[in-house]
Image (cartoon, grey):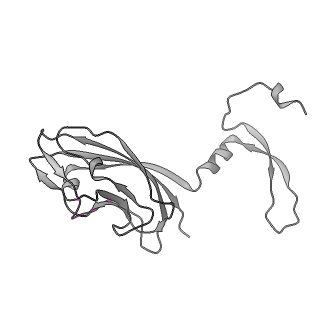
Amino acid sequence: MAIAQAYHLGTPKTNDLLVGTSIPSPNTNNNPITRNFSVGDILALGSAPNVVTTTFTVTNAQLEALGTSDVTLLALAGTENGEYVQLISASILTSSLGPVGSTYTWDAAGAFISWSDAAANNKITIPQNQLPLGSGLIGQPYTIAATDGSYTRGADLVLGTATDPVIVGTPNAILTINLTYRLFPQS
């Protein structure tokens, strides 16, 4: 076999092959086998379990009623039979289109993304000062990680807050959430 540094560098393609060892299942008498693996097959391993980033848009009407009506970001079937979901992080971007002087005043606790407002684990809390003002200003992007790596099964993933915002004037805002989460298949 030649010295590895003697080979030229190349740009990998998904159908290129790499040499590797296929390890047999535990507790068998089979020996490891040297095989070719495609770059595409190796890349496919990196996306399992399924990590997804999805963009959700929350409208002005949804923001005004957020304390009364949680916004369902991701609907997962049933409380015992649906998929497992694990929150990873969220990036928040607010655009405010209302006239200057109009505002939302949010609950001091801010808002949450989770399967329940009472959830203590795997929750994302959006601080009050990162929620939209509604007065013609565009907020700075804000990124936050989930509180921990736990997960839940089958409950809808929602955006909520304790109370509806207090509205002054005619605020108008859009909240854009880029949510990264992992889905585990149903069993």
Q: Give the residue displayed 64% in from the left and 50% down from the top.
A: 45
Query: Relative to residue 103, is residue 155 depicted above or below?
Result: below
Q: In which quarter of the image is the C terminus?
A: bottom right
The magenta-colored residue range is 66-72
Q: How many circles with numbers are drawn on the protein?
A: 0
Residue placed furthest toward the front: 108
- 60 or 31, which is in the foreground? 60
Provide residue 158's location: percent of width, then percent of height: 34, 61
Give the residue displayed 21% in from the left and 65% down from the top: 68
Q: Is the magenta stretch mostly helix, strand or loop?
A: loop
Q: Is residue 136 left or right of residue 78?
A: left
Residue 28 appears in the picture as rendered = yes
Answer with left or right where residue 14 lies relative to residue 184: right
Residue 147 falls in image quadrant: bottom left
Magenta residue check for 67:
yes
Asked if 10 appears above or below 118 in the picture, the reply is: above
Which quadrant holds the N terminus? top right
Is residue 13 on the magenta stretch?
Answer: no
Q: Can residue 71 be seen in this view?
A: no
Q: Residue 75, percent across and down?
A: 38, 62
Quarter where residue 62 is shown: bottom left
Task: Name which residue lies at 41% across and 67% down.
Answer: 120
Of all residues, the one furthest to the left in this rendering is 169
> Along the line of sight, which residue is nearer the eye, 7 or 78?
7
**Residue 4 at what x, y percent from top left?**
83, 31
Q: x and y percent of residue 129 in the render?
A: 27, 48
Q: Which is more toward the observer, 2 or 100?
A: 100
Residue found at the far right of this picture: 1
